[in-house]
Structures are given as C-alpha cells and as structure tokens.
C-alpha cells in the first residue's frame, strides 16, 4: 500500500496502547515516562479524502490509530520510530473529548496533587485517579518532586514558631483536612511582621529572592478571588510596596509602587476550579521577574533598572482580606529558584487503581 502523507506528532496523552507503543520504540521503560514522545502518523489512501488536513498543522488532535512496526518502512521511518497508522479518525482535542475518551477506557479524571512530603530540601507529591472497569491500562497514581530548594536561609512565616505574628492567634485559624501544613483563612485572618524580624541582625530584605505560594479558593467564594496574598510595605515611604494580589476570576497580579508610579504584572491562575494552585516568583537584580504557575514557566518580565527596589524597612503582610486555604508561603533569599517549587515532569508509580467503591 502506498502512503500518501505523514505528520509528526508530539504525544501528550496515550489513552490506550501504551504497551504496544513502547514495544516498538527504542526507549526503555514506560512510554508515559519518555522525555521525547515524537511519533509519526501515516495516512493511507483509503483515509486521505476523509482526513481534514486543514486542522493538522500546529493543532492538538485526538488520533485513533494502530501502532506499526518501524521495520516495515526503514527508508522513511526515523531510527527513533515508531509509526502510528490512522485507522479511523483524527478530531480536534477539547477538554470534553478528552474526558469522554478517558471515561470510555475506564479512567476518571486526575484528582488534585496531595501535600508535599517536605517543606524544603526535596519532597514528593502524589495524585490519583480511579478505574471504573475491572482493569485499566496505564497508571492510577503519579508522583512528582516538590520543594527541592535548599533549606538554608529559608523563611516560613506560617511555621509554628511564628505564632505571635498571627492575627488572630494561629490556634484560631482553621485547619485543612489532609493538609497538615495548611490553614483556612477568613478576610480578618492575616500575618503582620516586620521584615527585620525575619532576618539576622543587620540584615534587610534581600534584593534577590524567590517567593513560593500554594493556595486554594473555597466554593463559597464563587471562584472570585480577592485580597492580598503577600505584601512588602515600606514604613518610611508612603505608597512604596511590592504585593501579590488576587484580581478576580482566574487571575492574580504582582504590583509594585514607588516614586509616585506603579506597575502590574498579571498572572493567569485558574483559581475558579477550587483546586490547589502553586505560584513561584523570582526577583532578579531589582528589575527582572520570572514567574511559574502550577510548576510551569509562565512569563519573564524585564523592567527598568531598579524598578523592583524592594523596601528595605518593610513590613510583611500575608493573607490580608483573603478568603481561602493557604498551604505554603515560603521566602528563599535567592533568585532563580522558582522552578524548584514542583516539577512539571510526572512519573507513574502505580499500574492501576481498583474501582472506587460506590
């Protein structure tokens, strides 16, 4: 049979057939763990007229295919193969299509990531999904590394030793089930502490630092986040501050004010799904901000020189007018650490999960 066209695909998810795909690939181990998931899609003559080529370039597709041994076509198959042969259809990806297919093969959606096993120095997080059939191919549990930044110099204002800085008393902050380091905040719950108390004698707030935050809105908020998560405010210079604020549905913003002007950097954070989300912000040289959201790089902004001159005499305010759950609020006096909050690379750690009891 003559093949009329091929496409290069970067695999995002494998619904079924991962074992077969691995068997003809040069990569060892599970296909769910490979770092390079490039495969080729071959469209046969019998499907050529049915395939919508206009949606193929730079598109996210769901492809229904079978695996072909690359040895059958050595001249055109790259050495790292394998081929996929289109046998039925390729449709545009959407969340609804994705959920429907996973349900069809027996998997429910992934639950949220659990708490990190360590607050610094390298821990692990786990998330799970459930199989609704006698067995499902693939993994029911995944893990990733988290909080891999060095513990040295780390400042954790939520630690038990910081009780006297809580308003009201830390004991009155609500606990969060199954999250031992998390607190449930109301608009009148906050931390107020002079930055001079955070550092050794003679030290001021660092020019370069990384801030790690993990938070979750509660359903009663309606998904509309508001309040200040983190703010450095100068005691001597009125209107001089650096703050991370919630800005409505699915957004936060980093705001800097000083010298009679202010600037904002917006962050897209899907808080309205009421799951835990992670924000990491690195400040470099008082003018460069690198931001990660949910373990992936979001943006880097380079501003004018000294644009982010953080107040050296600042008060640190956490959680003011914020209503939700706060698990992590960690300050590391180093730049370039934002990617260490959690890894975007996940590994399967359990082959399947038995069906959820109803």
Image (cartoon, rainbow, N blue to C red):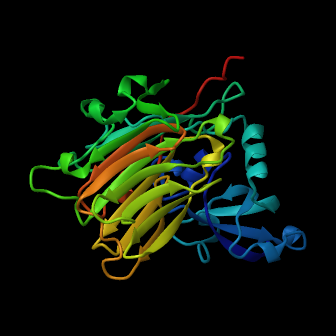
Q: Is residue 126 above or below residue 29?
A: above
For the residue pair 166 and 154, the one nearer the viewer reads as: 166
Tell me which residue sits at (71%, 76%) in the image: 57
Image quarter in which the C terminus is found: top right
Residue lying farthest left?
A: 201
For the residue pair 180 and 64, the one nearer the viewer reads as: 180
For the residue pair 326 and 170, the one nearer the viewer reads as: 170
Image quarter in which the N terminus is found: bottom right
Tell me which residue sits at (69%, 67%) in the image: 41
* Residue 164 position within the rendered picture, expressed as x and y whole percent measured from the top left: 27, 32
Image position of 164 (left or right of 105) = left
Image position of 277 (left or right of 91) = left
Q: Is residue 349 visible?
A: no
* Residue 102 position within the rendered picture, expressed as x and y whole percent measured from the top left: 72, 42
For the residue pair 205 and 99, the one nearer the viewer reads as: 205
* Residue 243 position within the rendered picture, expressed as x and y whole percent measured from the top left: 42, 59
Residue lying farthest top?
A: 358
Residue 284, located in which quarter of the rendered image? bottom left
Q: Is residue 338 visible?
A: yes
* Residue 79 position within the rendered picture, expressed as x and y whole percent measured from the top left: 51, 70
Residue lying farthest bottom?
A: 304
Q: Is residue 105 above or below residue 195?
A: above
């Amino acid at each position: 049979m003559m093949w009329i066209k091929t496409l290069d695909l970067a695999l995002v998810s494998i619904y079924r057939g991962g074992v077969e795909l691995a068997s003809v690939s040069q990569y060892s181990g599970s296909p769910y763990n490979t770092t390079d998931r490039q495969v080729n899609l071959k469209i046969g003559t019998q499907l050529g007229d049915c395939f919508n080529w206009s949606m193929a370039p730079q598109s996210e597709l769901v492809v229904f295919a079978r695996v072909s041994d690359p040895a059958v076509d050595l001249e055109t198959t790259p050495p790292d193969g394998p081929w996929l042969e289109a046998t039925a259809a390729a449709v545009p990806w959407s969340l609804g299509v994705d959920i429907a297919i996973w349900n069809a093969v027996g998997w429910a959606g992934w639950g949220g990531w659990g708490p990190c096993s360590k607050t610094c120095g390298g821990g692990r997080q786990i998330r799970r999904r459930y199989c609704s059939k006698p067995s499902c191919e693939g993994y029911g549990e995944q893990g990733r590394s988290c909080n891999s930044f060095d513990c040295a110099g780390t400042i954790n204002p939520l630690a038990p030793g910081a009780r006297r800085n809580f308003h009201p008393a830390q004991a009155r902050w609500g606990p969060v089930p199954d999250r031992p380091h998390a607190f449930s905040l109301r608009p009148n719950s906050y931390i107020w502490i002079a930055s001079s108390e955070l550092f050794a004698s003679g030290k001021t707030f660092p020019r370069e630092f990384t801030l790690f935050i993990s938070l979750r809105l509660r359903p009663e908020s309606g998904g509309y986040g508001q309040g200040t998560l983190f703010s450095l405010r100068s005691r001597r210079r009125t209107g001089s501050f650096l703050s991370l604020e919630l800005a409505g549905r699915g957004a936060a913003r980093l705001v800097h004010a000083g010298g009679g002007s202010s600037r904002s950097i917006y962050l897209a954070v899907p808080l309205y799904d009421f799951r835990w989300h992670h924000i990491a912000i690195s400040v470099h040289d008082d003018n460069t901000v690198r931001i990660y959201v949910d373990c992936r790089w979001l943006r880097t902004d380079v501003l004018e020189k000294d644009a982010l001159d953080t107040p050296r005499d600042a008060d640190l305010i956490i959680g003011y007018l914020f209503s939700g759950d706060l698990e992590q609020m960690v300050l590391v006096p180093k730049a370039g650490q934002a990617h260490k909050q959690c890894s975007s690379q996940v590994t399967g750690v359990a082959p399947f999960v038995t069906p959820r009891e109803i």
